[in-house]
Image: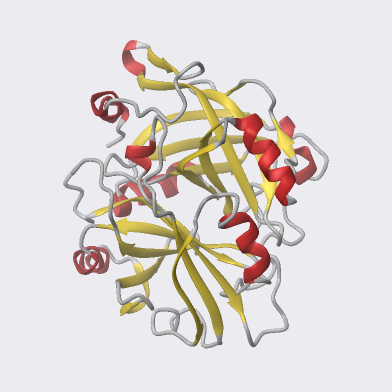
Amino acid sequence: MEPIICGIQQVGIGVPDVQEIWTWYRTMFGVDVRIFEEAAEAPLMIQYTGDKVQARTATLALSMDGGGGFEIWQYTSRNTEKPTFEVQLGDLGLFSCKIKSRDVRSSYNYMVQQGVKILGSLSNSPDGSLTYFVEDPNGNPFQIVEGSGWFTATGHPSNCGGVAGIIIGVSSIEQSLKLYRDVLGYETVVYDVTGSFEDFSPLSQGTFRRVKLIHREARKGPFAKLLGPTSIELVQAMDRTDVKRIFENRFWGDWGFIHLCFDIQGMDALKRKCEQAGFPFTVDSANTFDMGEAGGRFSYIEDPDGAWVEFVETHKVPVIKKIGWYLNLKNRQPGKFLPNWMLKAMAFNRVK
C-alpha cells in the first residue's frame, strides 16, 4: 500500500518548564486537551542526545477547534539548552510555528489586551492573507494565519486553533522540495517569491526566497478531520553567508521547535518511500512504543539541512481517560476517518 500522511500531528517544543508554558499556550491558543502526559527516559534518541539516555517529561496537547497539537517537552536529567547565538530568519531548521485563526484581527486584539509580545503589527503575506507574529515567553516565534478546515467551535476568546503549518529555514529550496513536496505530499505552490516582505520585516530586513506549499487534496486517516489542512513554508536567505543550523551543537529536545511530527498510516511503506528519496529513517521504534496513555510506532528522518521530521503511526489513544476508554487503531482500515462524535469525546480530557 501507499503510505498515508494524515496531517501534522504536532510540533515538538523544547521548554524549561512544561506546566508554566502550557498555561500560556492554553490561554493564547486554546491548545487545552491533554492526550498524554508522561515522564520517562528516551533511549531510542541517544544518537541525538549525546550518546546518553536522557530523561524527560512530555505533554501532548490539542485544540478541539482543529489543527495540529504541541508536544511540550522538558529535560529532567539535564538543563534545557538555549542556542548560543541569536536565531535569525533563514537559519536552518524549524523557525516558526503557524497557528490558525478564525479572525486574525480579532486574535491580534485579544493578544494585545493580554500583553503578549507582538512582533511588528498586522500585515499581509505574499498571498494577500492577513497575518502577524508573536513571541511566547520562551522567545519562540509563532505566526498567526488565516485558518481553514475547522473541527468544532469551542468559543476560545483568542479565536485560534492549533498548528496550521510551519516556517522552515533551508539552504536550498530545490533540495528541500524533494522531501516536503515529493515525499510528504505538499504538491501545490501557493507562492514562490524572492525579495523583502512586509510580514517578515519585524523578523529580519534581509532578502529571502519563500515558497509556500499546501496539499490540494484533503488528508485522510483516523484523525485527519481534527488535524485539518496545513502548509509548509520554505525560506531561504539570499543575502546571508552566516546561516547556522538552529540546533547546531545542541541536543534534540533542547530549547525551541524540536521536530515536525506527522500522523501517518503505513510505516513500512513510508520507510521504503523515504529511503528511495534519500531520506532514510535514523530512528525507528519498530513495534509499539508506550507513552503511558498512548502508544504506536514512531520514526525520524532528517531534512536536507538536518531538521528533524517525525512520523507516528498511532496504535492506542485515550478517548475518555476518566472511564478508561482507549481506542485501538492497530487494525483499522487505512484512510478511514474516525467518527466525529468519537473525536469530540476527547474534549473530556480538557484542562481548564
Res. 347 in view: yes
Q: Is 104 located above or below residue 218 in the figure?
A: below
Q: Is 125 located above or below residue 215 in the figure?
A: below
Task: Give x and y (percent) for residue 76.
Answer: 63, 38
Color style of the picture: secondary structure
Taking the image as shown, residue 77 lies to the left or right of residue 236, namely right
Image quarter where the C terminus lies is top left
Task: Give x and y (percent) for residue 296.
Answer: 56, 24
Taking the image as shown, residue 140 lies to the left or right of residue 342, namely right
| Point 68% across, 65% down: residue | 175
Q: Quadrant of residue 266?
A: top right
Q: Quadrant of residue 220?
A: top left
Residue sitting nearer the eye, 40 or 216: 216
Residue sitting nearer the eye, 120 or 346: 346
Task: Give x and y (percent) for residue 79.
Answer: 66, 48
Q: Quadrant of residue 286?
A: top right
Res. 83 in view: no
Taking the image as shown, residue 343 lies to the left or right of residue 177, namely left
Farthest front residue? 1
| Point 32% across, 11% down: residue | 323
Residue sitting nearer the eye, 173 or 22: 173
Image quarter where the N terminus lies is top right
Task: Give x and y (percent) for residue 234.
Answer: 55, 67
| Point 52% across, 75% down: residue | 210
Could you tell me how many numbered marks the image carries? 0
| Point 22% across, 57% down: residue | 102
